[in-house]
Image: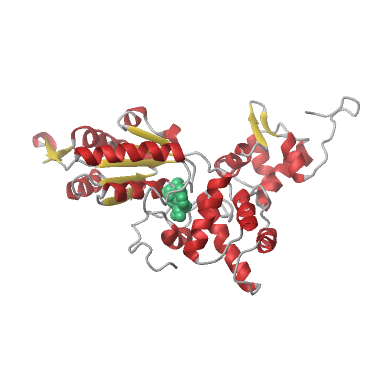
Amino acid sequence: MGKSRPKTPPEQPKRTPQAGVVPGIAHPERYSEDEDRDVSLRPQNLTEFLGQASMKENLAVFIAAARKRNESLDHLFLIGPPGLGKTTLAQVVAHELGVEFKVTSAPALDKPKDLAGILTMISEKAVFFIDEIHRLKPAIEEMLYIAMEDYELDWIIGQGPSARTIRLPIPPFTLVGATTKAGNVSSPLISRFGITCRFAFYELTDMEAILRRSSGILRVPLDDAAASLLASSARGTPRVANRLLRRMRDFAQVRGGASITRAVVEEGLARLEIDSLGLERHDREILKIIIERYGGGPVGAETLAISVGEAVDTLEDYYEPYLIQSGLLQRTPRGRMVTPLAYEHLKLPRKDRDENSGFLF
Ligand SMILES: Nc1ncnc2c1ncn2[C@@H]1O[C@H](COP(=O)(O)OP(=O)(O)OP(=O)(O)O)[C@@H](O)[C@H]1O
Ligand SMILES: [Mg+2]
């Protein structure tokens, strides 16, 4: 671990994998092991935060302007799939503003007093990060509206007929809300955020840069060919890239080499059964089942879920997004269908439905 890297890890709300999901190494969901180990790799400021260029440029302007006015930054809404850097960016923003960083997640805010406890103690202009903000309880969400707009809390004192509401002032602060499911966030809440950042999957060149930066911190040499192969297998997701890099470092060490070369990566990925698109065995099995048992589809989600031995939710939330995003699978009104790219990638022949009518596609 680098010596001058960050001191205390921020409190990270742990997220457990969905019940019944066997975590795959190339799947971007967060697991506690990563959180503990990623601390040294996590960028601390905007310069270290690689990729997402236009989002970063805008943020730099907003941060500079807020600093100049000596005001808190507008509330910031971060949207994007797991592992793309939402928590990291929230922390970077606090660092760039030079303010306190306070972390929680929506499921941890159970009662109004949980929120009030944080907001009454928070320091002026602090960044208050709420992860998984789509999971806020309605009572907490309403309390947050007033806090975001007026920097006040509605607080009920007393009980029964003598109960009354008082408004408690709180310091101006910046709420940073993050979600992987923007569709589940209510519009009144969304409308209270002044700035929205939508994360895109990282370009290959950005992924390579992230891998190079991480290899420097981990002090393991990574050659260019190895970086480019790892970058293309990491699903455009920095968390996956860092996870794969650590595993490749293990393979390199066991082989007795000091550096990660293309040969190490080729062998390492083969051993982990991760292919050039970042698919794992089970991802490929899902595509294969659609091709071999259902003629390439369409097949209904429920039938498919049973065939692959997963719950429908797991199939939809955990496996399908990346298959769809990488152009291997389509969701159609009649069910799931593989694309020609899936046949090509799996090197499976496309079968004709009708022997004489040519290809299906
Ligand atoms: N832009 C970036 N540049 C370099 N490294 C990054 C970048 N974004 C993320 N990372 C690395 O990826 C890891 C995962 O990022 P992070 O935890 O911020 O993702 P997240 O979007 O909050 O995911 P989740 O939705 O699961 O909470 C970080 O620990 C960091 O090391
Ligand atoms: Mg996060």
Between 137 and 15, the one lying in front of the other is 15
Residue 274 % position (x, y): 66, 54
The C terminus lies in which quarter of the figure? top right
Tell me if 40 is positioned left or right of 320 in this view: left
Asked if 353 appears above or below 108 in the picture, the reply is above
Asked if 276 appears above or below 191 in the picture, the reply is below
Residue extending farthest right: 356
Q: Residue at x 63, y 41 (%)?
A: 323
Between 230 and 54, the one lying in front of the other is 54
Quarter of the rendering containing residue 359: top right
Between 278 and 286, the one lying in front of the other is 278
Residue 151 % position (x, y): 18, 37
Asked if 163 appears above or below 18 in the picture, the reply is above
Q: Residue at x 59, y 42 (%)?
A: 322
Quarter of the rendering containing residue 158: top left
Q: Residue at x 48, y 48 (%)?
A: 83
Q: Is any part of residue 90 visible from this angle?
A: yes
Residue 162 % position (x, y): 8, 36
Residue extending farthest left: 162
Q: How many marks?
A: 0
Tell me if 200 is positioned left or right of 332 in this view: left
Residue extending farthest bottom: 256
Tell me if 246 is positioned left or right of 88 in this view: right
Q: Is any part of residue 312 visible from this angle?
A: no
Q: Residue at x 51, y 50 (%)?
A: 238
Residue 212 % position (x, y): 53, 57
The N terminus lies in which quarter of the figure? bottom left
Q: Name the image colouring.
A: secondary structure
